[in-house]
Amino acid sequence: MGEKVKVVDVTARDGLQNEAKLVSTQDKLALIEKLVWAGVSDIQATSFVHPKWVPQMADAEDVAAGLARFTGVTFSALIPNMTGYERALAAGIRHMEFVIAASETFNRKNLNRGMTESLQLLKETTRLAERDGVVLRVGFSTTFHCPFEGKISSRAVLNAVRAAREIGPWRIALCDTDGMAFPDHVKETVSLLLGELKMKASDFILHFHDTYGRGLANTLAGLEAGVREFDSSTAGLGGCPYCPGASGNLATEDLVDFLEGMGYDTGIDLEKLLDAAEFACRFSSRPYQGHLLRARRAGACGLAPSVSA
Amino acid sequence: MGEKVKVVDVTARDGLQNEAKLVSTQDKLALIEKLVWAGVSDIQATSFVHPKWVPQMADAEDVAAGLARFTGVTFSALIPNMTGYERALAAGIRHMEFVIAASETFNRKNLNRGMTESLQLLKETTRLAERDGVVLRVGFSTTFHCPFEGKISSRAVLNAVRAAREIGPWRIALCDTDGMAFPDHVKETVSLLLGELKMKASDFILHFHDTYGRGLANTLAGLEAGVREFDSSTAGLGGCPYCPGASGNLATEDLVDFLEGMGYDTGIDLEKLLDAAEFACRFSSRPYQGHLLRARRAGACGLAPSVSA
């Protein structure tokens, strides 16, 4: 058995949130069931955001209620504010992603508040989480690059993560929201955080998009920096809402194949995962955004003579 | 200025060879002109293969004749046999790729001869090349994985490359023909060759396909192993003829963006390269296979509020 790497599937939240056509609660739960069946042990299932902003997530309570049937899986939900926290808590969610940005401009555009206010909100949320036995994960959007501010220096990320860790002992997701990260920058940022803060590699999750085809290269950089947990979205659903036509999140099937092919153990059955990916395609307004399913659909190798290199 | 990395564009050969619809010589030369205009200094322009096998390359002589108008560019052509060599020589080509496989089965299917015969042919070709002042490059198909034999051990590649290098001092292209290479295997293979043979990193060229989205991750592994020259195909044209529907070669625009973003200097103007990629798309029977052009087409960032991570 190879070294374990955890894959967190975020299709039902990040993957679907930008899809205008509403997916039924039943279909969302059917997708989650297929992921569980494939062996995915960590799933971000929904977002408790106001339906005015993300209509696709209006059924967050119903999705949460449907999760009770699955055992042995860690389900989480995104919360943008205190109302989200209270709703998620009431719905039985015990793992929540508190979202903040590494860029002041993106924080304001995405969350309608400044980073200082977000940190204040993290403080209040932490107080409640500790009271309620809720585990938070702090997700930093635009860790490496912001569509408005450009490249984010690893120093700026260090300051932001330090401030968050002074508030609570939460694990940190470094999110490449617009897919503009480069492997050298990923490695530099993770190494700086590990060197300067009292954190272990296991305190980090990396969340890559494949907008520019760099999702797996950035994953490799993350692995080399010691990180062993990655977010991804089945069939590559999702993407940056600020670049609507661009391709999406790193596809879970591409990620799992990549990791398993290098000898890591994800605990996920790739064939069953591809079933889930085929199913997820029906919710996408775009052609398939990943790679593995396309290659598989193309079929096995033929025997036609040719000259190739 | 960053460290130099050479990008060899193979669109006009590898990219087009599997396209059933014939591209006119004029269009091929127009594409090459756009690549030259973008600053691409190394271009594989055609293949002197029998038109019965690859009808798309039936105009090899005409393409070669059209190259005289460009200066300061190294043009090469693929040759599958001695007839190809003689044709290429007569057409004025002075850089040729001699193709062989790292897998016996693939060599037989692709070239209709065994590896021993291929090495014998390399010997004869080398004799002529030295007489004629022709520079060969030995391209090993299926260096990392063969659609028929599966994973190719780095030991087998070592033996094959050693045999080739005993024949002539040619540079070696390690080609991931079916896109099944993984970064750890790439690094292991290159490191073994560098350790066991009297070769420098600059003796190698890496040629990746992006079938499974691993093109850039494998490039990163190659860079980490010291290689500084990579093949790619504009708009991701090409692919393994034995997996017809699968996506193709690593896209030149994705590669150049990746390298420049990490501080390497390719000497290529990305905006002009994207013009070439847009132009190349019209020759493809498939939707666009790269990433960068799709992201660019999606346009600049909007301002819609949402909650993203």
Image: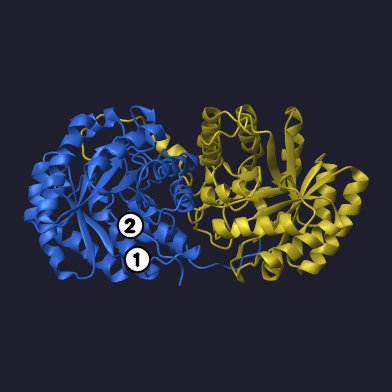
Chain colours: A blue, B yellow
| Residue B158 image-quadrant placement | bottom right
**Residue B35 picture location, percent across and down:** 62, 33
* Viewer-side residue, A69 vs A204: A204
In this rendering, position of residue A227 left or right of residue B259 = left
Residue drawn at 68 percent across, 63 percent down: B110
Q: What residue type is labelled 2?
A: Thr
Identify whether A217 is placed above or below B264. below
* Residue B133 in sight in this render: yes
Q: Are marks 1 and 2 on the same chain?
A: yes
* Viewer-side residue, A175 vs B78: A175
The answer to the question of whether label 1 and label 2 lie on touching residues, with beta carbons closer than 8 A, is yes
Q: How many numbered marks appear?
A: 2
**Residue B169 picture location, percent across and down:** 84, 50
**Residue denoted by label 1:** A273
Please identify the quadrant where the C terminus of chain A is shown.
bottom right
Q: How far apart are marks 1 and 2 (CA)?
A: 8 Å
Residue drawn at 35 percent across, 52 percent down: A236
- The label shown at residue A74 is none
**Residue denoted by label 2:** A234
Identify whether A3 is placed above or below A139. below
Q: What residue type is labelled 1?
A: Leu
Classify 10 Å Cα crowding around label 1: few (below 14), some (14-19), many (20 and above). Answer: many
**Residue A193 picture location, percent across and down:** 39, 42
N-terminal of the pair, mark 1 or mark 2, is: 2
In this rendering, position of residue B111 left or right of residue A46 = right
In this rendering, position of residue B254 left or right of residue B2 = left
* Viewer-side residue, A34 vs A197: A197
